[in-house]
Structure formats: structure tokens, C-alpha cells
Amino acid sequence: MLVKGAHPANSLAFLISSTELVIELGIVLWVLLGWRFTLANILLGLLMVLYAYGLTALWFPSRLAEEGKRHAEQAQKDEGTGMEHGMGGNWRDKLTSREGWRPIAHAFFMEWAMVWKEILFGFTIAGFISVFVPQSFWDFLFVGNSQDPGLWAVVENAAVAPVVAFFTFIGSMGNVPLAAMLWLKQASFGGVMSFLGADLVAATVVWIHAKYYGWKYAGYLSLVIYLCMVAAGVMVHYL
């Protein structure tokens, strides 16, 4: 979207929304954690978008964004995913032809193939962590009582949870089993929600951002997203 002409703030909003507000994530959350977490995740995604617009309005390095856009254009050319490879014609032509539906079907099956792999990997990692990491470690990492945490505990949990997510290397779907584990390990609700939003700052995702945008713009994106998820996690906790 950035390469096609979207404003960087809108591109960032799309990045957050396409990760936090997708239907399959809501389904997995409902099944594993219940409808309250599904509703909270929708609020989390919407708040992260609002905070992202606010932060980019206050602090936006235009020259860095232009550098990131040029880097993304070159990355797309190197991968052969530029606009010149898209199907021609208007949207009616695409929806009424086999050629148009083929990439739609391909994207659909690729999405669900990724979902079950991420969930399986997430359950595996969550199982190992549950068995080998003692409760004392989580009590040290997440201060306060999850049943009635104070403001400092909520903020601390929301700030620490993305750091944990950074080292799990797991995407949005795989984060759900780990979020359930953190909830059982007495992390606050705000901390769990911040963790669910932190798939955008997992080490693998940061590396992919650097691949497309360069390290400088990837660092800016990661910092803005981190601040958004911490603030949104705290807000959702109290909502």
C-alpha cells in the first residue's frame, strides 16, 4: 500500500488492522479464551490505530518514510511482486473470470494453512514454557496481582509483555495459546492484551519490516507500534 501511494500513516493503520482485526484471529480467540477476549482484541486494534494516527501526527520523520518507500519499491522489484504483474481489467472482470478467482482462492488457502501451523507452533512453545519455566519467573516478570492489579502493575505488565513476544518469534495466531498461558500465569488483563498486539514486534516480523523498509524505518515502525500496543493494552484493561 505504501508503494502504491498510501500515506505512511494509513499504511501503518492497515498494518495494525490487517493483523489485529482479522476474522480468523477473532474465531481463535473466542474458542481458546472466550468472547470477552475477542471483544477486547477488537478494541485493542481500534485503539492502536487511533494511537498510531496520534503519534504520527506528533512525530513523523518524512525523509525516513520516503527512504522506507524507496526501499520497499526495490524489494518488490527484486521479488517480482510489482504492480505490473497484476491482472488487468476492472473489478467486475476479476470477479467474473476464473483468472480473477484463482489468486483469491490461492490467498484464502495460504491464509488458513498459515493459521493452523502458527497455532500448532504456538501450542508447542506454550507447552514447553509451561513445563520448564517456573511460576516464580512469571511472578518476577509480571508484578502485581492479576485479579486486582494497581495502575503501576497494569502499565508494567503491558510494557513487559511485548518484550516476551519479541523472543517467541510467533505470529498473531500462534500468540493466542501463549496469551492463554500468560493469563493462567497471573499476568494482568492489560498485559495479556498487550501481548496479543505484540505479534507486530516479534523478532521475525521486525526482520521482515527491515527487509522491506530498511532498518531505520523498521525501527521507527516498531517503536511506534510498541508504544501503541502498551497504551492500548492499559486502556483496554480499564475499559
Image: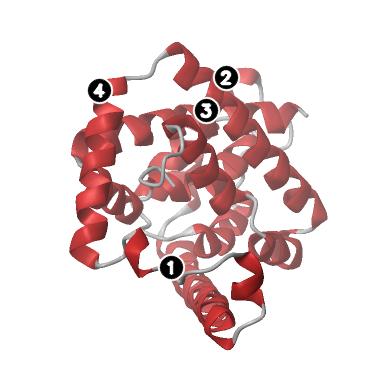
Q: Earlier in the sequence, mark 2 or mark 1?
A: 1
Instruction: Name the residue tied to disc 1.
Output: 125
| SS under mark 3 | helix
Residue at 31% from the left image edge and 20% from the top image edge: 61
Q: Are marks 3 and 2 in contact (CB under 8 Å)?
A: no
Q: What's the CA distance linking mark 4 and mark 2?
A: 37 Å
Would you place residue 134 above or below residue 14 in this image?
below
Q: Earlier in the sequence, mark 1 or mark 3?
A: 3
Image depth: mark 4 or mark 2 in front: 4
Residue 100 visible in the picture: yes
Q: What's the CA distance linking mark 2 and mark 1?
A: 29 Å
Instruction: Name the residue tied to disc 4.
Output: 63
Residue at 73% from the left image edge and 50% from the top image edge: 37
Q: Earlier in the sequence, mark 4 or mark 2?
A: 4
Q: Earlier in the sequence, mark 3 or mark 4?
A: 3
- Residue 82 % position (x, y): 31, 60
Q: What's the CA distance linking mark 1 and mark 3?
A: 30 Å
The residue under label 1 is which amino acid type?
Ile
The residue under label 4 is which amino acid type?
Arg
| SS under mark 2 | helix
Q: How is the image coloured?
A: secondary structure
| SS under mark 4 | helix
Q: Nearer the viewer, residue 113 or 135?
A: 113
Picture quarter with the C terminus: top right
Residue 189 visible in the picture: no
The residue under label 2 is which amino acid type?
Trp
Instruction: Name the residue tied to disc 3.
Output: 52
- Residue 90 % position (x, y): 58, 65
| Label 1 Cα crowd, 10 Å radius (few <14 / some 14-19 / many 20+) | some
Instruction: Name the residue tied to disc 2.
Output: 152
Q: What's the CA distance linking mark 3 and mark 2?
A: 23 Å
Which corner quadrant of the image does residue 60 belong to? top left
